[in-house]
Image: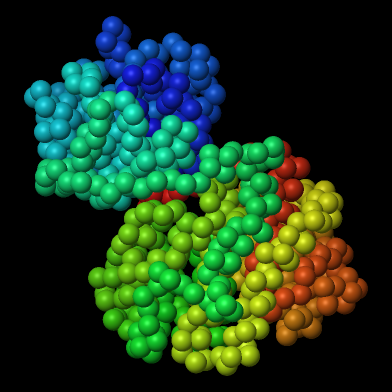
Amino acid sequence: MCGIVGFIGREQAAPILLEGLSRLEYRGYDSAGLAVYDREKGLQVVKAKGRLQVLRDLTDGGAKVPGTMGLGHTRWATHGAPNDENAHPQVSQSGRIAVVHNGIIENYGELKSFLEAKGVVFTSETDTEVVAQLLEFYYAGDLLDAVFKVLHRIEGAYALGIVCADEPDKLVAVRKDSPLILGYGEGFQMLASDVTAVIQYTREVCYLDDGDVAVLTPGGVQVYDSLGQPEEKERSHVDWEISAAEKGGYEHFMFKEIMEEPKALKDTISPRIRDGKVVLDDLTITREDLEGMDRFYIIACGSSYHVGMAAKYILERLLRIPVEVTLASEFRYCRPIVSEHTLALVISQSGETIDTLAAMREAKRLGARLLSIVNVVGSTIARESDDVLYTWAGPEIAVATTKAYSTQLAVIYLLAIHFAGLLGRIGPEEYRELVEQLQLLPGKAEEILKHTEEIQYYASIYFNHDSVFFIGRNIDYAVGLEGSLKLKEISYIHSEAYAAGELKHGTISLIEDGTLVVALASWNELFDKLMSNVKEVKARGADVIGIATESHKAALAALVDSALSIPDIHPMFLPSLEVIPMQLFAYYVALMRGCDIDKPRNLAKSVTVE
């Protein structure tokens, strides 16, 4: 969601802050602002509704805001409308203290009433201003002391960046349930909500833990725990190139990341297959552990939840262990049946998704063993899990996930084969076939991407539809959920996915002349049944795009208006191929509708509030 950048050093801060914020635009935002301290001008605050370019223009790229210490922020509105007054940084009544904030202060109403009774006048509708005003209320010449007093009063999830005009030689960073990292440099230090904001300046970072408070000065960083005791933090070296977070000649990050899927799949799969065996070095789960498991719970949100839906079919098919897939936002409230015999499989691209993190902690409280699949090394979900498998997808900038979804699926395949081998659920021949077929997956994905013009052509025919339905059976249904989400989130077309067998139980009443239906028919065992559903919607006037494997393309083309095919592969790995045409279709439809593809309205990349 919101983006935070902080800098303290010898160079002018504002241009660095603006550049860092530009690296965080993918997170979603509706206003942006800077707070920079200058010894002559004091604490300067500039903020504006709209895109970051508005702020750039106001400050002449930062040139009009002198000073070598400050904070930058991109806000995604929660408390209060997106306008200049509610933009961050929020400033205390005297103008001495400025705060940027990701997250939500849950008891802000109570605190605001307390401060107003003391004569404090508020100028915004935000919960963040409460933090700034409360800091000033407690400030008595020691900023760190005031910070700890405020932390004892506020409740909720937050990442905070704090500056005080009376102590211009320091930045303060605070983290609880919302990601915040520190970047170490020679003669400068940085803080940010994502490593992409600092990678241009330093590769040495550390990930703050919940309750950590950091004081940054030009010469170094001191981190304190929640009790105010100094602590040493482990540093990490970021080894991916900055070019991985740039467009590299592509018009949009989303298209670039779709084109990167074959490489991302290879990077995820190849290092984990040695001598024909799946080798998961970091996994500590043994055969005995698995034999003691009576069920798996998959916990995730959004596209990761759709990975879980596909994973249910795959894991139950190979392992014969019951798998329940639960939306993370619902998990804590459904009184889940979890015990020490439960494996909680937690899936999150960022490793910081607040609903997923809260659900994971509840599962742990109930006794489950935690295995997470994440992309971001050192993220909170990764650190708090018993075991973690990284997707190694590299940075994903577009809000609509593509390669992260595909690499999460790839980890599921590896996990399923590994577990099935441990438990003896599959014999040597089937094991060998699965491994061989899995290794073919990146090449087959590359084949699909050689024919983007065909998908672009179909998008040009159907981009003006107002409502689209995706139908499928078995794993096709699970993939249809993701195809539908991709279309609606970037093109703003109403779209729904249904198990094809459910059409006659209500949904078919919505089909009329010209309704677009996307029929997913790659699961060859159920191809004929799916074609019966196609005939049902065709009889009621629907236009149908069908997707099937090459071996069924001719039969598909005879029954649908437009036919797409994917290469034949073992049925278990179909989701990774089938989703690519749908990602491309959504991309081209959004492009033709003139949508902001990388930054769709109202959406954010990393969801760090409930």
User: What colour-coding does the image apply?
Assistant: rainbow
Badge count = 0
- Residue 124 point in image, percent of width and height: 33, 27
Nearest to the observer: residue 554 or residue 560:
554
> Where 62 sits versus 609, above or below?
above
Q: Quadrant of residue 262?
A: bottom right
Quadrant showing the N terminus:
top left
Q: Quadrant of residue 298?
A: bottom left
- Residue 41 point in image, percent of width and height: 30, 8
**Identity of the residue drawn at 83% across and 77% down:** 552
**Identity of the residue drawn at 28% across and 70% down:** 364
Nearest to the observer: residue 307 or residue 409:
409
> Where 107 sits versus 482, above or below?
above
- Residue 410 point in image, percent of width and height: 57, 68
**For the view shown, which residue lies furthest in the left direction?**
140
Q: Quadrant of residue 445?
A: bottom right
**For the view shown, which residue lies furthest in the top direction?**
40
Q: Is residue 587 visible?
A: yes
Horizontally, residue 13 falls left or right of residue 543, namely left
Nearest to the observer: residue 405 or residue 328:
405
- Residue 36 point in image, percent of width and height: 34, 19
**Identity of the residue drawn at 66% across and 46% down:** 256
**Identity of the residue drawn at 80% across and 78% down:** 531
